[in-house]
Amino acid sequence: MPLLQIQDLVAHYGDFQALFGINLTLNKGETIAIIGANGAGKTTLMRSICGLLRNAPEACILEGQSIGAFEAADIVTLGIAMVPEGRRLFPSLSVEENLVIGAHGRDTGGYWNLKTVYDLFPILKEKRDAPGTTLSGGQQQMVAIGRALMSNPRVLLCDEISLGLAPVVIRDIYSALPRIKDAGASVIVVEQDIGQAMKVSDRVYCLMEGRVTLSGNPSDLTRDNIHAAYFGASK
């Protein structure tokens, strides 16, 4: 049984339909990457999985439990946490206060706590009393990841975590993924950088205009396959 199964998922914003029958699976210990151009539906998919957009109950199944109609707060308690695009830190709170909020409502006693998050990202311990929004973009991203980890998720959703960051910072952020997986989380990464997505994932799904246009192991996908799935076949 997959850890997470998305089946025939559709999503709307009012009368506008953003997703059309999405199907994907995430297995335990796996990283999958979602790629696609702006407007392809990647963030909508993440919002649907974490409960910010409600769906049919059977559209999202976590270890056999239908959770598609659950509210976001309930989904966090079940073990799905998201690192949102743009980081979304609380500007009035310190780094440590931002982190502690991530543990609210999910007292699992798992691997992740302030000590282990600071071990993963030592700079955050140095900056723990600083307002979160005074940090650099990369450090803010570390806070956002740490905040999600504080809930000890089984599924970690990472939405565009490399956006706007320098390559050396992106490398540092992604170098944390193996330890995150070793601690028990399976990961879904939304990533516009195709090379980065292929490098860190076990499987890749490409979205275009709200539909899955390609899926497979990175080693099996050709440049032409990806280009056609990303932009549409040339006429």
Image (cartoon, rainbow, N blue to C red):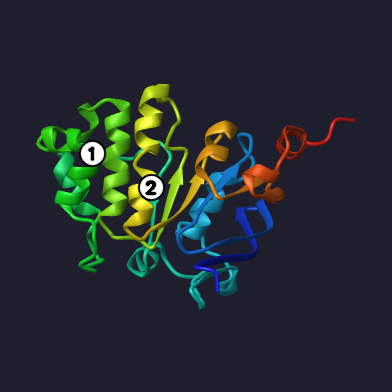
On the image, which quarter does residue 81 sit in? bottom left
Report x, y in % for residue 220.
Answer: 70, 45
> What amino acid type is highlighted by mark number 1?
Phe
Horizontal side of residue 97 vs 23, given as left or right: left
On the image, which quarter does residue 35 sit in? top right
Image disc number at residue 121 = 1
Q: Please indicate, yes or no, whether residue 58 appears anywhere in the rendered image.
A: yes
The residue at the far left in this view is: 129
Query: CA–CA distance between discs 2 and 1?
Result: 14 Å
Horizontal side of residue 121 vs 77, given as left or right: left
Crowd band around label 2 with a 10 angstrom C-alpha radius: few (<14), some (14–19), many (20+) = few
The residue under the point 35% across, 63% down is: 76
Image quadrant where one finds the N terminus: bottom right
The residue at the far right in this view is: 235
The residue under the point 36% across, 35% down is: 173
Q: Please indicate, yes or no, whether residue 207 appears anywhere in the rendered image.
A: no
* Marks 2 and 1, the one that precedes in the sequence: 1
On the image, which quarter does residue 122 sit in? top left
Question: Do the residues bearing badges 2 and 1 touch, measured as CB atoms within 8 Å?
Answer: no
The residue at the far front in this view is: 219
Report x, y in % for residue 117.
Answer: 21, 47
Q: What residue is pinned by disc 2?
A: 178
The residue under the point 40% across, 44% down is: 84
Horizontal side of residue 208 vs 114, given as left or right: right
The residue under the point 65% across, 53% down is: 19
> What amino acid type is highlighted by mark number 2?
Pro
Report x, y in % for residue 108.
Answer: 24, 69
Image quadrant where one finds the C terminus: top right
